[in-house]
Amino acid sequence: MIAHFDVDAFYASVAQRDDPSLRGKPLAIAGSSRRAVVLTASYEARPFGVRSALPLFRARELCPQLVVRPPDFARYHETSRQIFAIFAREARAVEGLSMDEAFVDAGTDDFEAAVRYAQDVRAAVRSEVGLTVSAGVATQKMVAKIASDSAKPDGLASVVPGTEAAYLAGLSVSRLWGVGPKTQARLSARGISTIGEVAALDDDAVFRLFGRWGIGLRDLARGHDTRHVESERETQSVSSEETFEEDIQNIEGLCSPLRELCADVSRRLVAHRLRGRTIGVKVKRADFTVAGRQQQVAEATDDAEAIYAAALACLHRVELGGLAVRLLGVRVAGLAEDAPRQMSLLP
Amino acid sequence: MHMCRSEGKRRYGGAARPSPQFAPPYYRYDDIYVFYDDETTDSERWRIDRAVKFTCNTKDIANAVGAASKVVNAHTTVPILSNVLLTAQDGTIRIRATDLEITLEQGFSAEVTEAGSITVPAKLFSDYLGNLPPGIMELSGTPARASVKFERSNYDFHALPPDEYPPLPSAQRGATFSLDAKRFREGVGSVVFAASNEEARGAVLMGTLLEIANDSITMVATDGYRLAKWDTKLSRGIEGAATKYIVPSRALSEVARNLGSSDVVEVSALGPAQNQLSFTAGPTSIIARLVDGQYPNYAQVIPAQFDRSVTVNTGTLIGGLRRASLVAGDRANMVKLAVANQQLIITASSDVAGNAYEELEVQQTGDDLTIAFNAKYLAEILNHIDSPQAVLEFLGPLSPAAIRPLEALDGTTQLYVLMPLRQ
């Protein structure tokens, strides 16, 4: 059995836990720049329409009495470690999705036992860490996650084995894994709005709507999700990005932030003893279109200068189309841990 | 179209066309008939008049345009640089293409009726010519259009005015030398692969160093991890002090590819600053812009002496390395070479793929040694060794190793240096 745990309004809850004066108030955690967006909104702020990713100025318009606090990532990391330690106590495997969210293989095939495990975890997090966690328990990942979403805040929902398809049937297709706004619009044009309607499609219809990829999607809709909880997901890439206070007009202006991003990526690679061969940049233009370029270097690297040189070459290949740049990101992938190092001939 | 802007000219179209006899005072210009008048300047008249017409063998033109189009940068944003320039004069057609770093020009004989120039899209024209059967074709053109007649077919290609085409560098010549074409091909084949192909690591390491003394030439390429060096006697060297050039490696590859049946490559430095090098072999000339920079002091990184060596069958070692690297996984293609008791043992392993073990008979001199290499680099070097037996020389597990053929070709030396992997 699989449990999905998700801390309720994580950043905001940590702030309210640490500062009692914030409790019961509409609270947003956000940066201080002119372009800051809400990272987390407390449950008190949500009735006003304040939610994650909303620009802060919009949030203040919607909720004038909104209290805003800056994020404290060191504190979140520390809290996250405590919570994950609790998840792992009885579990067979823990697959962290973010600092405050994880799939856990409960280590039992017994439904009742798994529900008891999830309740124990919720109680332990509440008493030992002082935060509330919502949980979903099911035989499979997607159903467990949908269940925990529906249980928020501070709840537990479970789906009895064998009833997955029935549980999913009435839900909106947007809850299906991999269905975003575009796919949802395409489906709704065909009169499909619930997961049950996707489950009822035959192979022909699935191919026409989604291509080959659609069979897996329909399997999910029918309640067939065979993915395991994978503990210790390998790091695929290390990246760093920055949204600028003001758009940057030209490549020259991007060089210095690019250098800082590369230095940041380099520090993290070194800390994890990783080196990578694929170096790429991501650019969000003033019109919010996103472009990226990447390249392979001959020798895997963790060196800030080498990453910068390759990233700059990639940046030169990005077509900006005369537009200013809003966001710049650097990513190193193709990682190997503690790989042997090619020695250099030249000083 | 520049002609239409002038007030002094009238245009005819459709039914009112004069008969297409092209006799003065009007001339066909891209389906527009332009009248000369008193205000027409000489240079305008020259432009209008500058047509071209010739008859040639399809194979000749297909070869020349094919060679030139390989130089064209497919991603250029300057339209004229996607084109090849055709110039017809004195019974010869010269085809030229450039990406501003490398310029290639190839000539062939033809029957020129009207001398002149035209530029046509390189890829399109080359693909078209490549699909023509052997035979005789006729090309006639104006600055804006090239028309090809071949047997019962007729094609028009959009052209761009030839006077916008980048000019050749100044013909002012500096040092010149020449080299046996076969030797040149060997040299380029021996070293160019070792140059870097990452722009991010700079233009110098992407280049190949040519060192010319009065009787010898040395070619060196390195990407900072391996180094290739080749030298030979020159059929005609330069006078005076030794000269060094850093040539874009791909320019050398282009020259080697276009040697055809020529016996000799003539090389000259060009331009007032001598910052271009031209290579001429038979009907083909390639002009390369030299890399402006300081080449690493390669002599310093080649150890003067080694204290142990193995002599091994080149092909057997390449086979072993390639098989072993299959299980090396993503760990930098690492293979370990252990030398002991006149044997070379290759091992490799990774969590994902498994283990490899290969035993080779070798002739060992000096102490035993275990050293790790990127198998890809070592195999690539061995692949360029022109000898059934290769010699590998070592100083220690963290020092550069040398790889060379046991028997060198007459008058030529080939040497490779490879840095090991540090675990």
Image (cartoon, coloured by chain):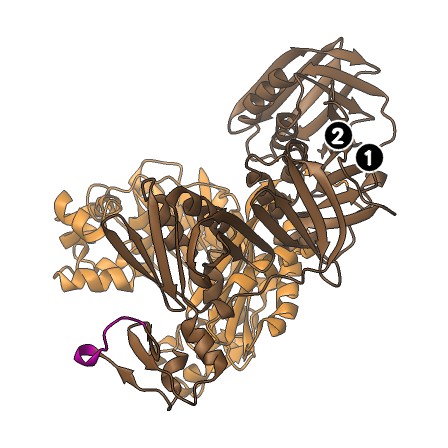
Chain colours: A orange, B brown
Magenta range is B14-22
| Element assignment for label 1 | loop
Q: Position of residue A255 (x, y in %)?
A: 63, 68
In depth, the one of B213 and B332 nearer the eye is: B213
Q: Position of residue A310 (x, y in %)?
A: 61, 55
Q: In the image, is residue B20 part of the stretch drawn in magenta? A: yes
Output the chain of dot 1. B
Disc number for residue A334:
none
In depth, the one of B299 and A142 nearer the eye is: B299
Residue that sits furthest to the front in the current view: B23
In depth, the one of B119 and A286 nearer the eye is: B119
Question: Compared to B127, does B5 lie above or below?
Answer: below
- The residue type indicated by label 1 comes to Ile
Residue A268 appears in view: no
Binning the other alpha carbons within 10 Å of mark 2 as few (below 14), some (14 to 19) or many (20 upward) gives many
Question: Where does label 2 land, which residue?
Answer: B415
| Element assignment for label 2 | strand
User: Separation of disc 1 and disc 2 at Cα?
Assistant: 10 Å
- The residue type indicated by label 2 comes to Leu
Write down the quadrant of residue A92 in the picture: top left
Q: Residue at coordinates 63% horizontally, 50% vertically from top-left?
A: A269
Query: Would you say the residues marked 1 and 2 are in contact, meaning their CB atoms lie under 8 Å apart?
Result: yes
Output the chain of dot 2. B
Binning the other alpha carbons within 10 Å of mark 1 as few (below 14), some (14 to 19) or many (20 upward) gives some
Disc number for residue B302:
1
Question: Compared to B387, does A339 lie above or below?
Answer: below
Q: In the image, is residue B166 part of the stretch drawn in magenta? A: no
